[in-house]
């Protein structure tokens, strides 16, 4: 009987010690409800400390290992739950996207890239100024980009004039953004850039009538590709004339001779002005004029006087 009493006392003592054992973050991570209860107790103690202006109690509570452990466990649990929720949403969105992609691929199966792009343009919700980010629109955008790439690969094989001819057909009835016309315009710009990549300034100027023809004068083939090529080559000659005195003087004076010869013809103002612009705005007089300014010799250059050697 005495032995049983001893065992009972030992058991009670061990249970008491277990109950008094300090709980750490690992424990609270496995018992989130207990962590919330503990943190609630800590919050109440902090509130009491602030209410009674008890600095010691406040400090003790904010440094209490179990309060800190419970708070850390809850924070980590919240992060984990947020991560799981994010993964769930991503999986859900991925599945929805794949479903839409399958449906759209079936819809455009057997259609040309032009026809597929036309199908995309019919989906108003995906072509609005502020289009939705729905799985349907995301899927359509993927398919659209694939068809644009397909169209560009096909058109870029044609010469510049061949692409222009295709544009005549593709842009006849639809010039909206994202249309087949816009694809052709992109390719025309790329083709012009490709054609002029290694051309010198005289070649670039000579081909202006092609890449900046009246019917495409406002296109990027002219406004970007041709102008970029001209600027690239022009800058080289401006730099050359700025750094080389003899070539600069000879070129500048040659331009002055051309203007003097033009003045001697006593032409009507409009005709004279037009011919003068053809001289001063083209190679090499334009570059000599810019070099004149870069050298700090003046900014209003009309080639009225020669430069003395």
Image (tube, rainbow, N blue to C red):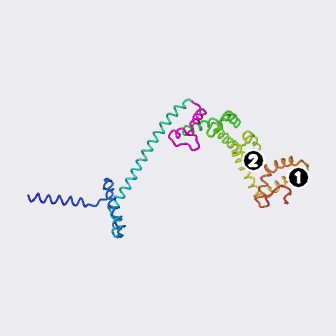
Q: Is residue 26 visible?
A: no
Choose the circle earlier in sequence order: 2 or 1: 2
* Magenta-colored span: 111-140
Image position, residue 96 (x, y; %):
47, 39
- The local crowd at label 1, few if under 14, some if 14 to 19, many if 20 or more residues have their Cα within 10 Å, is some
Picture residue at 53% right of the left edge, 42% below the top: 132
Does the magenta portion include 128?
yes
User: Which image quadrant is residue 22 in?
Assistant: bottom left
Q: Nearer the viewer, residue 48 or 251?
A: 48
Quadrant in which the C terminus is drawn: bottom right
- The local crowd at label 2, few if under 14, some if 14 to 19, many if 20 or more residues have their Cα within 10 Å, is many
Quadrant in which the N terminus is drawn: bottom left
Picture residue at 86% right of the left edge, 56% below the top: 304
Image position, residue 194 (x, y; %):
67, 42
Q: Is residue 244 left or right of residue 163?
A: right
Picture residue at 34% right of the left edge, 70% below the top: 56
Callout 2: SS = helix
Q: Is residue 270 left or right of residue 192?
A: right
User: Which image quadrant is residue 129 in?
Assistant: top right
Q: Which mark is residue 59?
A: none
Residue position marked by numbered label 2 in the rendering? 201
Residue position marked by numbered label 1 in the rendering? 260
Give the vertical position of 5 relative to 228 (above or below). below
Q: Is residue 34 visible?
A: yes
Image position, residue 52 (x, y; %):
35, 69
């Amino acid at each position: 009987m005495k032995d049983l009493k001893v065992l009972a006392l030992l058991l009670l003592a061990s249970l008491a010690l277990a109950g008094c054992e300090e709980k750490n973050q690992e424990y609270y991570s496995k018992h989130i409800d207990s962590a919330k209860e503990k943190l609630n107790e800590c919050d109440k103690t902090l509130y009491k400390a602030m209410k009674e202006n008890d600095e010691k109690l406040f400090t003790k509570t904010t440094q209490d290992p179990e309060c800190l452990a419970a708070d850390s466990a809850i924070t980590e649990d919240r992060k984990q739950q947020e991560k799981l929720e994010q993964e769930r949403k991503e999986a859900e969105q991925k599945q929805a996207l794949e479903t839409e992609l399958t449906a759209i691929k079936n819809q455009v199966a057997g259609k040309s890239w032009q026809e597929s792009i036309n199908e995309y343009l019919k989906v108003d919700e995906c072509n609005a100024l502020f289009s939705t980010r729905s799985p349907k629109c995301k899927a359509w955008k993927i398919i659209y980009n694939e068809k644009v790439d397909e169209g560009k690969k096909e058109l870029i094989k044609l010469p510049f004039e061949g692409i222009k001819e295709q544009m005549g057909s593709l842009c006849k009835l639809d010039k909206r953004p994202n249309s087949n016309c816009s694809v052709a315009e992109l390719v025309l710009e790329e083709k012009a850039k490709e054609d002029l990549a290694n051309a010198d300034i005289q070649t670039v100027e000579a081909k202006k009538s092609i890449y900046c023809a009246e019917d495409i004068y406002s296109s990027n083939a002219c406004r970007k590709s041709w102008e970029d090529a001209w600027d690239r080559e022009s800058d080289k000659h401006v730099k050359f004339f700025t750094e080389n005195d003899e070539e600069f003087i000879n070129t500048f004076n040659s331009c002055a001779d051309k203007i003097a010869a033009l003045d001697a013809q006593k032409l009507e103002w409009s005709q004279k002005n037009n011919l003068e612009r053809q001289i001063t705005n083209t190679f090499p007089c334009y570059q000599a004029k810019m070099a004149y300014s870069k050298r700090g010799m003046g900014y209003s250059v009309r080639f009225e006087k020669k430069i003395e050697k």
